[in-house]
Amino acid sequence: MIKLEKIHRNFQVGDQIVHALDDINIIINDGEYVSVMGPSGSGKSTLLNLLGLLDQPSSGKYYLNGGDVTELDEDRQASTRNKNIGFVFQVFHLIPRLTAAENIELPLVLAGVDEEIRKQRVNHALESMNLMERAQHKPPQLSGGQRQRVAIARATIMEPSVLLADEPTGNLDQKAGLNVIETLEQLNQHGITLIVVTHDEALGARSTRSIRMLDGRIESDNTDNKAG
Amino acid sequence: MLTKDFIRLTGTSLLAHKLRSFLTMLGISIGITAVVLLTSIGEGLYKFVLSEFTQFGTTLVGINPGKVTTFGMSMGVFGSVRPLTISDAEALKQLSFAKSVVPLVQGNAEVEGNGRTRRTTVYGVGSAFPETFSMKVGAGRFLPDDDPTAPRAFVVLGYKVKQELFANTNPLGQRVRIGGDRYRVIGTMEAKGQVLGFDLDDTVYIPAARGLDLFNRDSLMEIDILYKEGTNVDRVVAGIKRILKSRHGRDDVTITTQEQMLKVLGSILNVLTFAVGAIGSISLLVGGIGIITIMTISVNERTTEIGLLRALGAKQTQVLSLFLGEAIVLSAIGGAVGLLLGVGLAQLLHAMLPALPVHTPWTFVMFAEGLAITIGLVAGVLPARRAARLDPVEALRAE
Ligand SMILES: Nc1ncnc2c1ncn2[C@@H]1O[C@H](COP(=O)(O)OP(=O)(O)O)[C@@H](O)[C@H]1O
Ligand SMILES: [Mg+2]
């Protein structure tokens, strides 16, 4: 479970203070499918980075699975990211000199998992992402959709409880984008908490909960806008 | 992270830029090559000079008349000092640790024999000269242990003098004339070659007392004592001083032990080797700057990758060690190549110029490789720290 309490995130730009997040209070339960929408600059990415422990709030509390993670030191936050949080980015962020399989394997490598176990898990992930034939290909040899599926496999290889996706379809054509969203939704159906930032109203409408942001605030928070 | 994965990740990123990695390694290689080559030559010279000096053994003590004022200058040159005499040498034989005592006077004179003449170095010495200076008699025998004050007129010829005067005929029993006096040849020396530039074969040996007469001197130039191994040097010096002081009434001689000589010589040669190594190190410094440059470029290029690694849960220390690892691998491999090159070139040089002694001790090799790795470490620290301290959000946004 995710719980944000009075979260503020300010940036100092020159002598001006930008309130990227301005008093955010939300609770997201395990297994929810949340879309975050809003105009550019409304604080969506900042919110996601904060949820992913890549960024710290200026003030407020963040509880993940019951524990206060704002109190953790750098190393603990790193290991929480490694084990509990998966990231999917708009620009994929694959390492070009590593093969698809090696890219997927990275979080396991960082965690120091044994080679035997790694192989099994990576193979399993490749299979479920339908990337078996692409295992030994390097990112430049893959299509956009395939690259994003490699990124999703990498984000979920540690079986995290939360999957954060910042405009995952932003760099994809409609067909590949739909395929990626369906892949994410499948993972959500298997229990992962899915939080997707998107510009696309149609994609946003597919989630069970839709958060709209404006100027660092939550404008609206509609649960189950699809099923009614 | 497992060590194996660490090495693999480091390797792939270095292999991704082969030319760049190669050139960076080359910088370190050249530096290490220079250090190894120069110190090998320095150390070779050191060994060479030292072995030249110690070939007479290290238990040799030289006594010269007069007190040394400054390094190497003896007051004895200007007279006003009691002469060092043959009876002084005889008296020193009573020292229990003295294996042999050799009086020595030296000068140049014409030697005439077998109808030929040669100007050569004449040594007036005692009968213990060969054992004291590790010289070997080739034919016949060395000067006998005659009454030191009235020795018979015998001469022993150095190898070159024998060759020049007698060529292939047997000189033993022949007469030669040295400075007007007639001597009988009773022996010849084995060829010895040059020691520190002195031709030890272009010599003849006559008894010390006759040498003093020949050169019209009343003082020996030197008395050399070979003492028993294991004797404390201080005891040796003290014993010699005691006897000569009682004979001369004051302490008016200079005693030079081989140990002192070696110490001075050793420290001079060490400074030489060090200086030469330091010159080589300058090129290592340049190689180190190369690593800093490349690693800085690498961190800049891979900023998003660093952000990604952090997002995937890499700790700051892991990022730090990955980049540090790359710098160290570059310098360690560069260093190893440099070692091979350096040792190879040193051997090649020695093969082409056998007169130039080279020597590469293992400690130098280990030291040079350690130095290379240290340079990689030091050069890598700044860029790697920068990588580790990047803000992950900013890093991911870069491009
Ligand atoms: N590192 C930063 N420094 C200064 N301002 C920032 C920084 N990151 C974000 N902002 C500002 O915070 C606001 C929210 O940004 P962001 O979360 O990226 O918006 P969104 O993802 O909704 O487009 C914007 O006004 C942006 O300019
Ligand atoms: Mg954004």
Image (spheres, coloured by chain):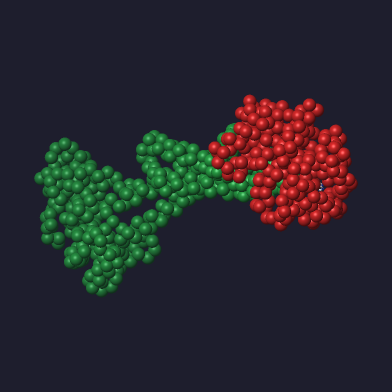
Chain colours: A red, B green
Q: Position of residue B227 (x, y in %)?
A: 23, 60
On the image, which quarter does residue A117 sit in? top right
Give the total number of marks visible in the rendering: 0
Query: Foreground residue, B315 or A87?
Result: A87
Can residue A160 be seen in this snapshot?
yes
Q: Residue A222 in the image: x percent, y percent? A: 87, 43
Task: Describe residue A172's horizontal placement relative to residue B185 as left or right.
Answer: right
Q: Which residue is found at the position 46% from the left and 37% from the top? A: B341
Is residue A169 found left or right of B24 in the rendered image?
A: right
- Furthest toward the left, the residue is B173
Is B337 placed left or right of B322 in the picture? left
Residue closest to the eye, A226 or A154: A226
Q: Nearer the viewer, residue A203 or B245?
A: A203
| Quadrant of the rendering where the C terminus of chain A is positioned | top right
Please tell me which residue is depicted at 88% across the width and 41% down the height of the picture. A39
Q: Is residue A164 shown to the viewer in this render?
A: no
**Residue occupying the point 39% across, 63% down:** B70
Above/below status of B141 relative to B340: below
Q: Position of residue A125 (x, y in %)?
A: 64, 34
Q: Specify the quadrant of the image occupied by residue B191.
A: top left
Q: As drawn, is A8 to the left or to the right of B157?
A: right
Counting from the top left corner in percent of width and height, residue A138 is at: 65, 29
Residue at image point 13% right, 57% down: B145
Closer to us: B87 or A60: A60
Relative vertical location of residue B261 with respect to residue B239 in this rendering, above or below? above
Rendered position, A152 above or below B363: above
